[in-house]
Amino acid sequence: MQYPDLTTATVSSSADVVRVVQLTDCHLCAQPGGTLLSLDTDFSLQAVINQLKARYPNPDLVLGTGDLSDGGARAAYQRLQGYFGQLSEHCFYLPGNHDNHREMIDVLGDYPAMAGTVRAANWQIVMLNSQVPGEVGGCLGAAEIKRLVQALDRGREEGLYSLICMHHQPVPVGSQWIDEQMVSDAASLFSTLEGYDGARGVLWGHVHQQIDWQRGSLPLMATPSTCVQFAPGSENFRADDLAPGYRLLELHPDGTISTTVERVEGIEFTVDLESGGYL
Ligand SMILES: [Fe+2]
């Protein structure tokens, strides 16, 4: 069952440029100190946040793009607020395959934290739900595509540029095992976006690695996890030894996006690289 959310949150940005932080795939366990491939996911998320606080204080808003918990535990979402809230009072979340959407809404609140669309300056950020309950793979479905069309129509009427966010990847990233989980109706997504000049970027998580590609002029962006990384170009599951990371985005008044991915520096993280899987 999907829980479509038609609410719109508005954030007043401090300048014309909207400064956004994306954190994704935090995989917080039910108990603090829980691990994924031997990595303490609370510890790695706090390390990410510490670096962000030192380097990029006071972003206009923070996006959490799914798999914020590892098993959908209520306690994980309660701790999540404590972590993200260190960066901004404007934090917005969408669910991934590891999340329990109902628990997310119960703990984080359906508005504004789980708002369907976030507006800031002359931008709107459309938060889509690609989760299919009980499945690892993603699908937007007719209801989310319809909501996207409504948001884009409204954005066109009001002169807003749009950044579209979801959890699963809408394009193959080159690793067979995880590309089996990509958004199954990505063709509908892209055929929709092609009709709107104001659609200026697609952003996701799930693949635990950096992607900065273009589809025509449309930026396609995926971001490292705040915990374990996946090795690119892998036929079967393989973890990578790169550090936890995050993405910074600047949404400019002319409809362009500047973006960089950074990783935590100065800390040794121990990950079980021999693991055959993480699901
Ligand atoms: Fe995921």
Image (cartoon, grey):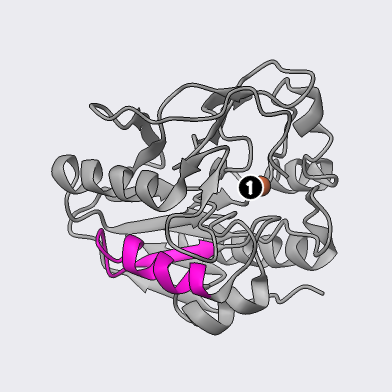
Q: Quadrant of the N terminus?
A: bottom right
User: Is residue 262 visible from the viewing direction of this image?
Assistant: yes
Q: Residue 60 versus residue 132: which sits nearer the camera? A: 132
Query: Looking at the image, which residue is at 48% across and 77% down?
Result: 108
Give the side of residue 109 with respect to residue 252, left or right.
Answer: right
The answer to whether residue 160 is seen in the rendering is no
> Residue shown at 65%/56% (left/top)?
96
Identified at 74% across, 22% down, the residue is: 175
- Dot 1 falls on a residue whose secondary structure is loop
Cβ of mark 1 under 8 A from ligand 1? no
Image: 45 above or below 89: above
Quick one: quadrant of the C terminus?
A: top right
Left or right, residue 47 beside residue 114: left
Which residue is label 1 attached to?
196
- Estimate the x, y position of residue 116 in percent, counting from the top left: 57, 70
Viewer-proximal residue, 269 or 11?
Answer: 269
Which residue ends up furthest to the top in the rendered image? 233
Which residue is more in the foreground, 16 or 112?
A: 112
Give amino acid for label 1.
Tyr
| Residue 82 in magenta stretch | yes
Question: What's the magenta region?
Answer: 75-93
